[in-house]
Amino acid sequence: MAGISKGFFIEFEDLEEIIYILKNISEVDLSGYSKSSLKRRVERFLQVEKMDLVDLKNAIINVKDFHNYFIQELVVNVTEMFRDPEFFISLKENVIPYLKTYPQIRIWSAGSSSGEEAYSTAILLNESGILERSFIYGTDISPKALETARKGVYSLNKIKSYTENYLKTSPRSEFANHYTAMYDAAIINKEYRSKVLFSSHNLVTDHAFNEFQLIMCRNVMIYFDKELQKRVLNLFYDSLSLFGFLCLGSKESLYAHDIKNNFKVIDKRYNIYQKIK
Amino acid sequence: MVSASEIILIGGSAGSYVLIAELLESLPEYFDAAICVVLHRNKQFDTQIERSLSRRLLRNISPAIDKMDICKNYVYFAPAGYHLMVEPDYTFSLDGSEHINYSRPSIDVLFETAAQIYREYCTAFLLSGANQDGARGLSIVEDFGGKIIIQNPDQASINTMPQAGINETQNPQVWDNAQIVSFFKNLNKQS
Ligand SMILES: C[S@@+](CC[C@H](N)C(=O)[O-])C[C@H]1O[C@@H](n2cnc3c(N)ncnc32)[C@H](O)[C@@H]1O
């Protein structure tokens, strides 16, 4: 897509006002999100919807459920199956052997978007022979993304690029073994869908809901400021069992956070950490 | 490390690498600004360019890191696969949203966000390239009082991008390669 036309630019003060209104009429608090990124998302929304700021504020306040739609369009949902194939290779080599020692394995994909990360992990677990005793929780705030995730249906166009990623992690396998093709889409096999539960959970306001051996939260915290990152990292710390693993996105690290002292670096390049105390 | 109160942006695509290497090579030992480069490249080449330049030039050249302070006397590259933005608290942020002008990182996105924060303390260069990315960003730098410089299209390996920059802006300065290099060479002597 082309960029945002100047006519749709807003000021940072306008952004603060929108954040304030949203906070008042819903439980969503965007005040800890990266401001420039969020501002561009608002501008993009205005451009796509052909609205101005006054329209937007009116709609948020007066139109029922508009704010849910708005928030859903603000968050960045871009994802892929086997995103950063090298990460999944590292997961297979460095984390799976540990997971194998557990009788039951609980995994959390936080900010799971449309489910690709959770399903990729399920496939990896299956290929390692431990899917049977594993369960994956995928959580997100976007109802639309959660709905797609639950269906496990992706366009064949997407499947094509996911196949390339997959073959980099499992070169001798067939990606087609993991889904059933329909006309112009594919549905992820039931054996995987039955091992993943998608539900709504807000990293900003909700609390720990289970204890996990592996938490993945990739490409979510880049949209948060440092303080919110800290809150979320504490939430993950509380949700991990001792010697459990935390995986962040390829541009997210514990480097700038004190909590790093409670973790051991397992893969520096792909940001895999193990809770050691 | 001291936060930079001035930022110099460089956007380049196909055919710009050699000039970028040359102008970084000509930098004085110390300069006051932060220099920030978006070079369109394949995700496969991730951080090789920064690493080899950093080793060759023995200076602070690094990929821009999310939420990191933007410091004086540093050269930053936008990492492959993410848009690079400037935040109101003078830090970087990365963003994996949709490609802009078929590009991520997009030059427009960096220029546009840096312009609104650094305003007249922002200087932007647009160099050789085969697409339109950066032109709109330049015009925004201009709108917010920054300085805009475009590589002379006659000297660019591929002139599409500089030409688009000229078409999109009001009063760009169009410089030959030698002028661009000399700007960086004399960085701390001007101002
Ligand atoms: C770019 S996607 C990441 C998907 C996947 N983890 C990956 O790396 O490809 C970011 C997701 O985080 C979700 N998100 C944003 N804010 C959130 C919050 N406060 N709580 C939970 N999820 C959130 C968005 O809805 C979006 O689906």
Image (cartoon, rainbow, N blue to C red):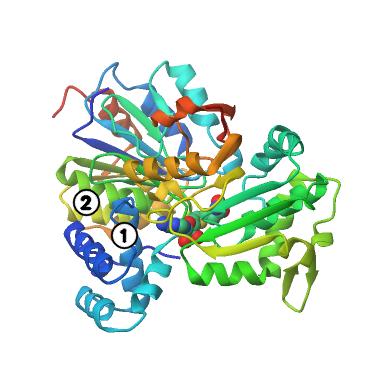
Residue drawn at the location 44% of the way across and 29% of the way down: A255
Q: Quadrant of residue B67?
A: top left
Q: CA distance from mark 2 to mark 1?
A: 24 Å
Q: Position of residue A23 (x, y in %)?
A: 27, 64
Query: The disc numbered 2 marks a residue on which chain?
Result: B
User: Does B35 appear above or below A9?
Assistant: above
Q: Which residue is mark 2?
A: B116
When asked about the image quadrant of residue A232, the answer is top left
Label of residue A29 in the image: 1
- In the rendering, at what x and y percent does residue B92 appear? 34, 41
Q: Chain of mark 1?
A: A
Residue located at (23% from left, 61% from top)? A15
Q: Nearer the viewer, residue A274 or A48?
A: A274
Position of residue A180 in the picture relative to residue A48 (left or right): right
Residue A18, picture quadrant? bottom left
Quadrant of image for the N terminus of chain B: top left
Q: Residues within 10 Å of mark 1 (few under 14, many from 20)?
A: some
Closer to the eye: label 2 or 1? 1
Instruction: Using the rendered image, report if marks 2 and 1 lie on a common chain.
Output: no
Q: Is residue A136 above or below residue A46?
A: above
**Amino acid bearing label 2:** Gln
Q: Nearer the viewer, residue B80 or A227?
A: A227
- Is the residue B77 above or below the residue A18 in the image? above
Residue situated in front as seen by the camera: A111 or A15:
A111
The x, y position of residue A265, in whole percent, is 56, 27
- Residue B172 at least partly seen: no
Q: Is residue A258 visible?
A: yes
Which residue is found at the position 54% from the left and 59% from the top? A139
Residues tagged 2 and 1 counted as in contact (Cβ below 8 A) = no
Amino acid type indicated by mark 1: Asp
